[in-house]
Amino acid sequence: MLVKWGSIIVKGSGKLGGHVFSSGPNGASVHTLARARNPQTIYQTAIRSRFTELTQGWRDLSESQRETWYQAETDFSKVNRFGDVVFLSGKNLYESLNSNRQSIGEPIMSTAPLPQPIPINQISRVRILSGSNEIEIVADYAVNTQYVILATPALSQGTRFSNNSIRELGRFSSNGVGTGIFNEGGMYSRYVGKFGEPSSVGKIFIGSYSVSKAGQKSMNSILKAEYV
């Protein structure tokens, strides 16, 4: 549960007991927390496994290694859901940066890195090419950089967007690509394996994010896909 205090509480976001607090264009809202019928999906199992590995990894660090993470707390900042700049604790920083690195296939860091520039990640068009079974992304990508591709299942046409539906499809390296069109037949196959065959009946959102060598994650760049 994330709370912002004023003379009284002025904002709230997250879970508390059996309820979820959120805010949107129509103001603040609260609703009953819905429990997933099958919480043991491959995606959720992989995330839990990653978290368990990092929790154990933090315990296995030497005191001098942990100290580098404590010292790095002020070097890395994040913006929370209220737009406030916050700093993670040494342990949370270790878990956050290394989890991001794991998503692009990089090994876990034992000592804290220095901040690095976050690679460009801006998508301008996404198309699902049904004739050739490919996902085409026109984007401003940095050369020789690892990116993680995101997607949603086919949502109803009345849906604007749903963060709860976004899932990782996999990663790709922009070796020699940079700005331009990226076609990846393998991503189409991964989409089918996760969500089933795409169609023009529903709205599908596809995007990506980049991760620096230090483990800093970019903002997600996500667009509604055109189906052709």
Image (cartoon, rainbow, N blue to C red):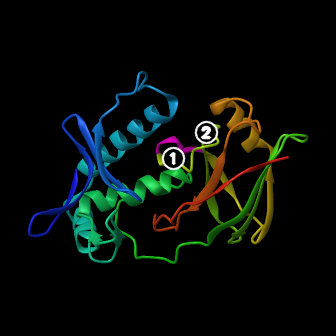
User: On the image, which quarter does residue 147 sit in?
Assistant: bottom right
Can residue 109 be seen in the rendering of this structure? no
Exactly how many numbered labels are in the figure? 2
Q: State the image coordinates of residue 73 (x, y, percent, origin top left).
A: 26, 71
User: On the image, which quarter does residue 9 sit in?
Assistant: bottom left
Q: State the image coordinates of residue 115 (x, y, percent, origin top left).
A: 42, 76
On screen, residue 136 versus residue 50, left or right, reads: right
Can residue 195 be seen in the rendering of this structure? yes
- The image's mark for residue 155 is 2
Task: Confirm or deny contact between disc 2 and disc 1 (CB under 8 A).
Answer: yes
Q: Which residues are magenta?
A: 164-168
- The image's mark for residue 29 is none
Disc 1 marks a residue whose amino acid type is Ser
Farthest residue to the front: give it: 26
92 or 133, which lies in front? 133
Q: Residue at x 48, y 27 (%)?
A: 41
Q: Residue at x 80, y 44 (%)?
A: 185
Disc 1 marks which residue?
Answer: 162
Farthest residue to the top: give it: 37
N-term-proximal mark, 2 vs 1: 2
